Structures are given as C-alpha cells and as structure tokens.
Amino acid sequence: MFEFLGGGWRLFTMCAETDPELWFPDSGGRSPQAKAICAVCAVREPCLAWAVDNREPYGIWGGLSADERKKLRTRRNRAAS
C-alpha cells in the first residue's frame, strides 16, 4: 500500500504524535505502550522493514525492539540459506 511512497511512509506514522521517549526505552527495557500503538499503525510493515534492512540498533520500530529485530534477521538468514 505504501510502497510507492519510498521513505514517505513516515508521514503516516502514529508514533510521530507521541512522546519520543516512549519509542526508545532504556537499554534492555520494554515499551508495551509503544508496541500497542505499532500494532494498529497503518505503516507498521514498512517501518519494520526499514528498521530491519537498515539494522537500526535502537528503539521500537514496527512493533519490535532492537533485540527482536536482530532475532528476526537471524531467522530470515537461516531460512534463506
């Protein structure tokens, strides 16, 4: 749906309207509020894809923490090999 926007999907994020600190919990911290917002965001998928593709090391992106994104990359790499 938002592929045609390139990076323009960011214009449609729900997170832009909330406290930025919610998306960047302390190291190892969790943010169930951020994940709940991501769960209903229209651009969750391109957001997550961007964070995974760019190896974003911090924050909640597309509903996943940095550790969760790292595990997702590992699973995808294993499946591809």
Image (spheres, rainbow, N blue to C red):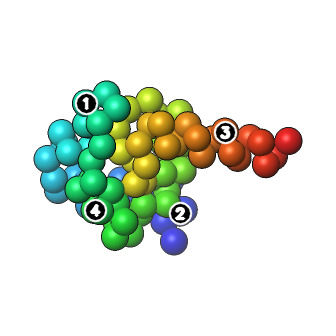
Residue that mark 3 sits on: 74
Q: Which amino acid does label 1 sit on?
A: Asp
Residue 63 lies in quadrant: bottom left
Q: Which residue is drawn at 29% across and 36% down?
A: 29
Upstream in sequence: badge 4 or badge 2? 2
Up-down relation of residue 39 to residue 30 (above or below): below
Residue that mark 4 sits on: 37
Closer to us: mark 4 or mark 3? Answer: 3
Task: Compute the Cα span from label 4 to label 3.
Answer: 25 Å
Q: Which residue is drawn at 55% across and 37% down?
A: 70
Q: Check disc 3: other Cα within 10 Å, few if <14, some if 14-19, many if 20+.
A: few
Task: Compute the Cα span from label 4 to label 2.
Answer: 23 Å
Upstream in sequence: badge 3 or badge 1? 1
User: Could you tell me which secondary element the residue under label 3 belongs to?
Assistant: helix
Q: Residue at x 63, y 41 (%)?
A: 73
Q: What residue type is labelled 2?
A: Phe
Label 4–label 1 contact, CB within 8 A: no
Residue 81 lies in quadrant: top right
Residue 9 left/right relative to 3: left
Which labelled disc corresponds to residue 26? Answer: 1
Q: State the image coordinates of residue 7 (x, y, percent, origin top left).
A: 45, 50
Residue 55 left/right relative to 20: right
Residue closer to the observer: 15 or 68 = 68
Residue 40 lies in quadrant: bottom left
Q: State the image coordinates of residue 3 (x, y, percent, origin top left).
A: 54, 62
